[in-house]
Amino acid sequence: MFLQRRNRILRQSPAIRNMVAETVLTPANLIAPLFIDEGENVKYEIPSLKGYYRMSIDNTLQEVQELWSLGVQCVLLFVKAKDETKDNTGQEAWNEHGLMQRAIKAIKAAIPEMVVMTDVALDPYSIYGHDGIVKDGEIVNDETVEALVKMSVSHAAAGADFVAPSDMMDGRIGAIRKALEQNNYTKVGIMSYSAKYASCFYGPFRDALDSAPGFGDKKTYQMNYANRIEAIKETQMDIEEGADIVMVKPAMVYLDIIREIKNTVTVPVSAYHVSGEYAMIKAAAANGWLDEDKAVLECLTSIKRAGADLIATYYAKHAAKLLK
């Protein structure tokens, strides 16, 4: 039998397969989300995120040290606000002595090289669990943007490298960029959740921060999962307003959107491998239905193959260990 081309030649050993791999996943591609709580020596396992914890700042610093040693160079911070600090203004979000601000300072003091990104949205601070200020049952846009600007400037003042607006309010990237410039935080970047869909896969995350909406849902500001062109439009507008990195969220069931955006823009593209996607792998592995290690690397590589330069994932530490 004579064949002009034998494709299997490039698959016959691990060394050859690695040599010609089109997509390479490294720890430097990963962003580790961290949930931070008040107190000392707090390490609370999130029931719907098995193996993932909400921790006080002291334990968070140990986690950050380990992540850095594994080659993970970026963390994305979320905080659990105390109930007594929640209201309908979000004012705790820009408290210079707030939990987020203290966490940023502590991490940058411990490992100055670690890239610190911060969540910018009002839901952790809202008595309604929504990403914005509520008036007459409506999440109002412009007043929320004013609050997000204060929040972003406060994070920048504390030492954040990037602010990451996740709220999906209109015009917030332009307003935040203007405020950062006016306050001389010209080195602080913006990673915008540009195409954030109204997804059912966020459930475990809301358990982590007790931030589920108290009424209705988030469909008036997060995107309809039936839409593709809208994602491109939202992303292009964020870039025009000054976003340095754009994000698609969720990741695994939106690989087509990641690729569409990667083919359209010239800034780095990130994707969020969300809590529900993590929980599905965990549950299947716990039941012996798949090999967790293999599933983690396959899923994260697929997200990168689709076009994501950066991947926020609860598997960041696990994957970094496997990649090491």
Image: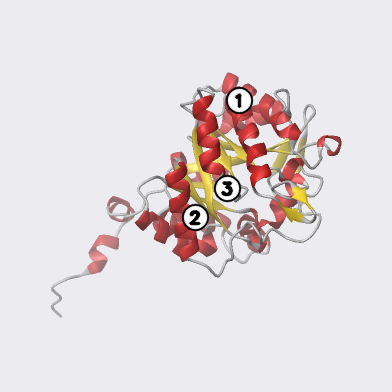
Left or right: 163 as drawn, with respect to 126: left
Local secondary structure at mark 3: loop
Left or right: 205 as drawn, with respect to 215: left
Q: Quadrant of residue 93?
A: top right
For this rendering, which residue is in front, 277 or 157?
157
- Marks 1 and 3 sit apart, C-alpha to C-alpha, by 20 Å
Amino acid at dot 1: Ile
- Marks 3 and 2 sit apart, C-alpha to C-alpha, by 28 Å
Left or right: 9 as drawn, with respect to 85: left
Q: Is residue 134 visible?
A: yes
Residue matched to label 3: 315
For this rendering, which residue is in front, 111 or 14?
111
Q: Closer to the N terminus: mark 3 or mark 2?
A: 2
* Callout in the foreground (3, 2): 2
What's the mark number on residue 23? none
What's the mark number on residue 107? 1
- Marks 1 and 2 sit apart, C-alpha to C-alpha, by 32 Å
Amino acid at dot 2: Glu
